[in-house]
Amino acid sequence: MEDFVYGISHQKTPFFTKKLISQYLLNDINEYIKTHQSKSVDNGVLAHRRKLDIDDNLRSDILEELLPILRSYDSDIECHDMRIYIQDFGNIKRHIDASLDGKSQFTCLIYLNQFEGGELKLKFRRQPDEKDPNKYTTYTFRHEAGQGIIFKKSILHEANEVESQKIIMLVDIESEDFMNQLE
């Protein structure tokens, strides 16, 4: 079973999607990407991609836009590690995310450009004790520049083959009950 997700889709779903970054900030981030050096990352699980660290000035600009939106759902939410990934080819294999800081429970993935392919697939067990990966409900997220999706780090996910360059930003989020605030 697979559902395609567009726009704001947090009603009765274990994830949250919304436009999180303005076009103005997207332009600033993409200018930053053009003028800064990225590092190659290839760990065997994820597609070959390049990582770009975010400096304090850009981080501050991003948080200035992002935090008010997120805090309208949970006033105690905190954003931790932030990084940009540039992927030219390949797919992202099925995995769950690790908490790099030991505090973050959620991943916030923000799309920074329009690209072909690379759709994110979130996989949820139909039954709490389900072990068979073929018996999952799958939500496929169609991206749009500036759009973000937030989900628990423990959720199994993958991404289809990228057909054109994909640029995303990952933000680690700490919140005790972010998803409960959405109901």
Image: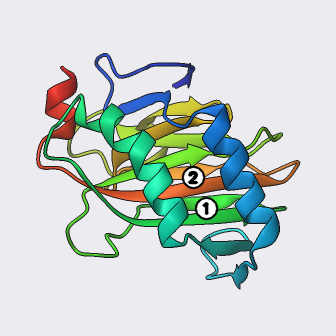
Query: What amino acid type is highlighted by mark number 2?
Result: Glu
- Give me the C-alpha separation between circle 2 and circle 1: 5 Å
Identify the residue at image location x=31%, y=33%: 14
Residue at the spot of label 1: 93
In the rendered view, would you say 170 is above or below 138?
below
Give the SS element for disc 2: strand
Task: Specify few, some or many for label 2: CA neighbours under 10 Å numbering under 14, 14-19, or 20 or more.
Answer: some
Residue situated in front as seen by the camera: 128 or 72: 72
From the top left corner, tell me how far across and down residue 43 is, in percent.
61, 82
Residue 42 shows which numbered tag?
none
Asked whether, in this view, residue 162 is left or right of residue 46, the answer is right
Pointers 2 and 1 in contact (CB under 8 A)? yes
Point 74% across, 74% down: residue:
36
Residue neighbourhood size for the residue with mark 1, other residues' Cα within 10 Å, grouped as few (<14), some (14–19), many (≥20): some
Residue 160, percent across and down?
71, 47
- Name the residue at 57% across, 20% down: 6
Q: Amino acid at mark 1?
A: Lys
Quarter holding the C terminus is: top left
Query: Measured along the vertical axis of the image, is residue 2 above or below residue 171?
Result: above
